[in-house]
Image: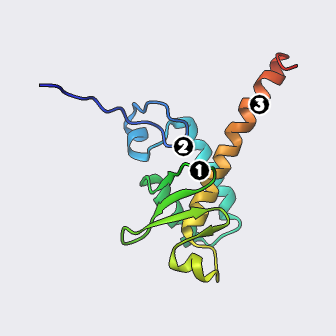
């Protein structure tokens, strides 16, 4: 009999999750802090109920990256799957274009944390004097 051990991974950086809180939220402590900071920033531009739904979607693991950069699969209220980017969404609200749906807000939050990581990776060698 063969058993397989599955390791939970951070939805942002891919590191193994060990704490109870990290397993519940899907993010390690550092990544969770960055996601919450990005959510607070997004809260200044969107309605509170949309931010709450976007955060819930992220914490439930309902924002999954596709093979295309900046494009994600998101889960709707009734389990529907939509393709979502910061610029558009295939959900009914996103297709009408009257307002920004919470799927797009969730992607905006996730993308804001990704840009922070890219900046940190590039700036570290420069700060250490290792860059050419």
Q: Which residue carries the number 2 mark?
A: 32
Vertical relation: 2 (above or below) 50: above
| C-alpha gap between disc 2 and disc 3 | 21 Å
Q: Position of residue 96 (x, y in %)?
A: 60, 83
Circle 3 crowding by C-alpha within 10 Å: few under 14, some 14–19, many from 20: few
| C-alpha gap between disc 1 and disc 2 | 6 Å
Q: Quadrant of residue 24?
A: top left
- Which disc number belongs to residue 120? none
Vertical relation: 30 (above or below) 40: above
Cβ–Cβ below 8 Å for labels 1 and 2?
yes
Mark nearer the N terminus (3 vs 1): 1
Q: Is residue 8 left or right of residue 13?
A: left
Cβ–Cβ below 8 Å for labels 3 and 1?
no
Q: Nearer the viewer, residue 4 or 28?
A: 4
Q: Residue at x 65, y 63 (%)?
A: 43
Mark nearer the N terminus (2 vs 3): 2
Label 3 residue SS: helix
Quadrant of the snapshot with the C terminus: top right
| C-alpha gap between disc 3 and disc 1 | 23 Å
Q: Position of residue 58 (x, y in %)?
A: 49, 55
Q: Which residue carries the number 3 mark?
A: 122
Between circles 3 and 1, the one closer to the viewer is 3
Q: Quadrant of residue 129?
A: top right
Q: Position of residue 106 (x, y in %)?
A: 57, 60
Q: Which residue carries the number 1 mark?
A: 36
Vertical relation: 90 (above or below) 128: below
Label 2 residue SS: helix
Between circles 2 and 3, the one closer to the viewer is 3
Q: Residue at x 11, y 25 (%)?
A: 1
């Amino acid at each position: 009999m063969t058993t397989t051990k599955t390791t939970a991974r951070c939805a942002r950086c891919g590191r193994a999750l060990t704490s109870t809180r990290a397993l519940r939220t899907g993010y390690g402590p550092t990544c969770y802090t960055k996601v919450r900071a990005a959510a607070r920033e997004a809260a200044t531009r969107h309605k509170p109920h949309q931010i709450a739904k976007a955060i819930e979607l992220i914490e439930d693991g309902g924002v999954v990256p596709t093979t295309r950069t900046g494009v994600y699969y998101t889960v709707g209220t009734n389990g529907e799957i939509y393709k979502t980017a910061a610029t558009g969404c295939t959900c009914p609200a996103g297709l009408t274009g009257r307002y920004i749906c919470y799927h797009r807000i969730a992607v905006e939050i996730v993308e804001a944390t990704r840009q922070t990581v890219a900046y940190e990776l590039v700036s570290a060698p420069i700060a250490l004097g290792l860059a050419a």
